[in-house]
Image (cartoon, rainbow, N blue to C red):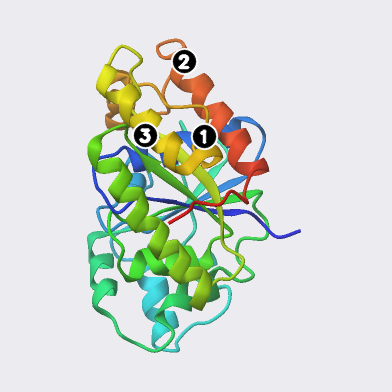
């Protein structure tokens, strides 16, 4: 059985993509899944929140792996050398960390660059129940590589005016990846983050997303809670006792993405 590889993506920054990634990983790990998080965002926020300890001279990161594959110094399975345990608050989670130098990979034009991450993962992730890739907030080479390596993509968005256009742009990219690089890529769904039932404007845009994308919109929006940002700052998962509704929603999303990886997102 192929290990599910879920790319969490949106080309717009600030939608809560990384917070969703780490708390989704925690929800899966608490359900006894062994989870690998690949931080493909040069901002390295997932690496920081997951409390990965890096030795500046010895620890390998995703940048090192992609560079080695691109230059022919490494091949299939190279990702294994960059896997680190998450911090003590994140039981059952391993991480392939990022550093800011990863941004240089966006400018690389080496042949087959879209396949470098997939090659590095081959033979290195089979011991995990699920792999989650935190994509950068752009539609550049790193996101293309993540979508090429993924089995499905989870689109994280907000119920705002810019959401509809943003999802449409990402849908075009997904279609391109399917056509040229990864015919088996599916869509796990569109996840609305920072939902507030007391805001009419957000209800309107949630309805708009539903009207356009129908069943692709996951029926478990993540509520807006200040504790999500506080937990990220403290490098811990969102505590159930302080945000039961958020934790219940992220657990429902975890179940959804593992069982519904074939939703179509129309362009």
Residue pointed to by mark 1: 218
Please tell me which residue lies in front, 173 or 205: 205
Residue 249 x, y percent position in the rendering: 50, 24
Residue 115 x, y percent position in the rendering: 48, 77
Disc 3 to disc 1, C-alpha distance: 14 Å
Residue 193 x, y percent position in the rendering: 37, 31
Q: Is residue 123 above or below residue 223?
A: below
Disc 3 to disc 2, C-alpha distance: 24 Å
Of mark 3 and mark 2, the one earlier in the sequence is 3
Residue pointed to by mark 2: 245
Give SS at disc 3. Answer: helix
Of mark 3 and mark 1, the one earlier in the sequence is 3
Residue pointed to by mark 3: 208
Mark 2 surroundings within 10 Å by alpha-carbon count, few (fewer than 14), some (14 through 19), many (20 or more)? some
The mark tally for this picture is: 3
Q: Residue at x 59, y 70 (%)?
A: 183
Please tell me which residue lies in front, 73 or 66: 66
Res 28 → quadrant: top right
Q: Is residue 162 above or below residue 131?
A: above
Q: Quadrant of the C terminus?
A: bottom left
Residue 61 visible in the displayed image: no
Q: Residue at x 39, y 88 (%)?
A: 71
């Amino acid at each position: 059985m192929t290990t599910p590889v879920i790319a969490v993506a949106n080309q717009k920054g600030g939608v809560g993509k990384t917070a969703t990634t780490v708390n989704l990983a925690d929800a899966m790990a608490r359900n006894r899944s062994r989870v690998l998080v690949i931080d493909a965002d040069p901002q390295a926020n997932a690496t920081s929140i997951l409390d990965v300890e890096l030795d500046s001279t010895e620890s390998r990161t995703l940048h090192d792996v992609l560079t080695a594959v691109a230059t022919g110094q490494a091949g299939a399975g190279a990702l294994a050398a960059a896997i680190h345990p998450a911090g003590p608050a994140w039981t059952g989670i391993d991480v392939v960390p990022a550093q800011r130098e990863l941004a240089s990979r966006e400018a690389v034009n080496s042949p087959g660059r879209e396949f470098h991450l997939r090659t590095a993962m081959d033979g290195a992730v089979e011991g995990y129940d699920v792999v989650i890739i935190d994509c950068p907030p752009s539609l550049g080479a790193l996101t293309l590589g993540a979508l090429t390596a993924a089995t499905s993509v989870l689109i994280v968005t907000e119920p705002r005016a810019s959401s509809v256009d943003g999802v449409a742009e990402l849908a075009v990219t997904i279609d391109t990846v399917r056509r040229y690089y990864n015919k088996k890529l599916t869509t796990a769904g569109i996840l609305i983050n920072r939902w507030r039932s007391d805001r009419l404007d957000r209800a309107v845009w949630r309805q708009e997303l539903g009207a356009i994308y129908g069943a692709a919109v996951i029926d478990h929006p993540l509520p807006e809670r200040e504790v999500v940002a506080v937990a990220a700052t403290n490098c811990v998962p969102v505590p159930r006792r302080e945000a039961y509704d958020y934790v219940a929603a992220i657990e429902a999303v975890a179940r959804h993405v593992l069982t519904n990886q074939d939703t179509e997102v129309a362009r």
